Amino acid sequence: MIRLKKPWIGRFKKSTDKLVEKFTASINFDCRLYYHDIKVSIAHAKMLEIVGLLTSKESKLIINGLKEIEKDINNEKIKWFIKLEDVHMNLEVNLIKKIGNIGKKIHTGRSRNDQISTDIRLYLREEIDKIKLKITTLRKRLIKLAISESDTIMPGFTHLQIAQPVTFGHHLLAWHEMISRDHSRILECRKRINILPLGSAALAGTTYPINRNLIKELLGFDNITENSLDAVSDRDFAIEFTSFSSILLMHLSRMCEELILWTSLPFDFIELPDFLCTGSSIMPQKKNPDIPELIRGKTGRIYGNLLNLLVLMKSQPLAYNKDNQEDKEPLFDTTETVKNCIDNFIKIITNLKIKPKKMYLSALCNYSTATDFADYLVKRGVPFRDAHSIVGKVVYYGIKNKKNFNEIYLDNLRNFYNKIDEELLEVLTLEGSINTRNHIGATAPSQVRSAALRAKKYLKKLLG
């Protein structure tokens, strides 16, 4: 039978009000940190033994007891009690029940303040490593698809108006650039997460001869926090992770917005397979792009989690405050949402059906090679502003007479500038337009393939 006794009850004469007890407890959500809390406690016990605060027998008893509790939790044999407030006290009371009073020694030289900060950092470190792998997979898929679509011509847009022809491969590599920046951000974020706060105790450190460097090695941290006041109250690392997540989801949302547009009938550039779509309960013909719509929708949820954490921390004096209990739910929600969104976006990219003919025909619209026409004139000595004006008049003529560039005869074009020759006809083709943009960062198919190969090589180097 577990004795449900609060660790701080000695100072109080009256029991906690039931409503307050329920309101202040965090066990309903922080119980998911049990694995990390046990891992931290095992490392702490090993350190206490080495510095002489536990005997070898006591340390072994505690460690074996914690391992048994972990198995019990995995087998759903542990019950969580609100009266014990949080994951730390629930585990400690279960340990005492299992091994007796020796279990009471595990909290020597630490506080729940530095304990929870360490738990969260361990949790986030593991989640980041999972997210890194997913981002890597997404980058590989985008690079592979960009190479295979390096010759596929589509319209490029500004203001959602057809602007200039590009290749679909080039467009995909633009997506890849966004994700590569996100990849860099999460790698930097991980460095600042992987710093050990344990040993800071409640706020001022501890009087016991602890060895923080030993715990750092046992738990795989890179560094140790330098200030105990900051260490127990800092949640910058959680905010930074949620900030990374917000930017990542913003990028995915932009991509999903394009996917949604491209599946619509006015565009019809791509098709999503049936197994990634749903239908309508009333309209039999509908095939809805629910996955990209949901990713777009969940972006606001992640923004909300970021704002939640920022507001949570904005008025907190040093050091730890109970407010910080509210950091976990938005953090847990963020990690799960990010992983799910990346997984589903990868599934979309892997199963896209591309319609190159539709893309090509769309790129022919709206005089998309008008800039190439102006550049052609500039290369023949016409100042760019004059060239711009000449081509503008040709476009107006085309709109008035319902003719695209390829439908206007050369003799008619010479009415606007008499030195136009047959070379212009090649310049005004979609192929001519993209092939002449042949420099690093541009849309020529050869440049797209080179850029994709550089990205592939850099990613391989990044992964070691």
Image (cartoon, grey):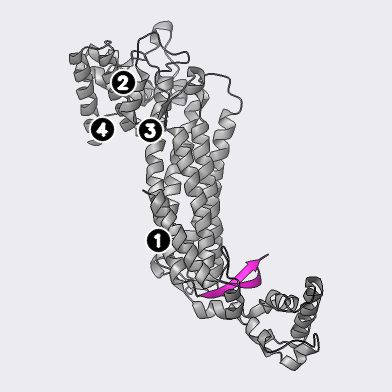
Q: Which label belongs to residue 122?
A: 3
Magenta segment's dominant SS is strand
Mark 2 vs mark 3: which is more N-terminal?
2
What is the spatial separation of the Cα atoms under label 4 and label 2, in whole angstroms?
20 Å
State which region is magenta: 152-166
Can residue 23 be seen from the camera position used here? yes
Q: Which label belongs to residue 158?
A: none
Label 4: which secondary element: helix
Asked if disc 3 and disc 1 are in contact, CB closer than 8 Å, the reply is no
**Left or right: residue 369 compared with residue 256:** right
Give the residue type at disc 1.
Lys
Please state which of residues 128 and 426 is positioned toward the viewer in this rendering.
426
**Residue 156 sits inside the magenta stretch:** yes
Q: Position of residue 293 (x, y in %)?
A: 51, 59
Give the residue type at disc 2.
His
Asked if disc 3 and disc 4 are in contact, CB closer than 8 Å, the reply is no
What is the spatial separation of the Cα atoms under label 2 and label 1, in whole angstroms?
42 Å
Can residue 256 be seen from the camera position used here? no
Q: Image height check: is 239 above or below 356?
A: above
Q: Residues within 10 Å of mark 3 (few under 14, many from 20)?
A: many
Q: Residues within 10 Å of mark 2 (few under 14, many from 20)?
A: many
Q: Which label belongs to residue 73?
A: 4
Mark 2 vs mark 1: which is more N-terminal?
2
Q: Which residue is mark 2?
A: 44
Please state which of residues 325 and 432 is positioned toward the viewer in this rendering.
432
Mark 4 vs mark 2: which is more N-terminal?
2
Q: Nearer the viewer, mark 4 or mark 2?
A: 2
Mark 1 vs mark 4: which is more N-terminal?
4
Mark 3 vs mark 4: which is more N-terminal?
4
Give the residue type at disc 3.
Leu
Q: Going 31% across and 32% down the picture, which residue do you hit?
A: 35
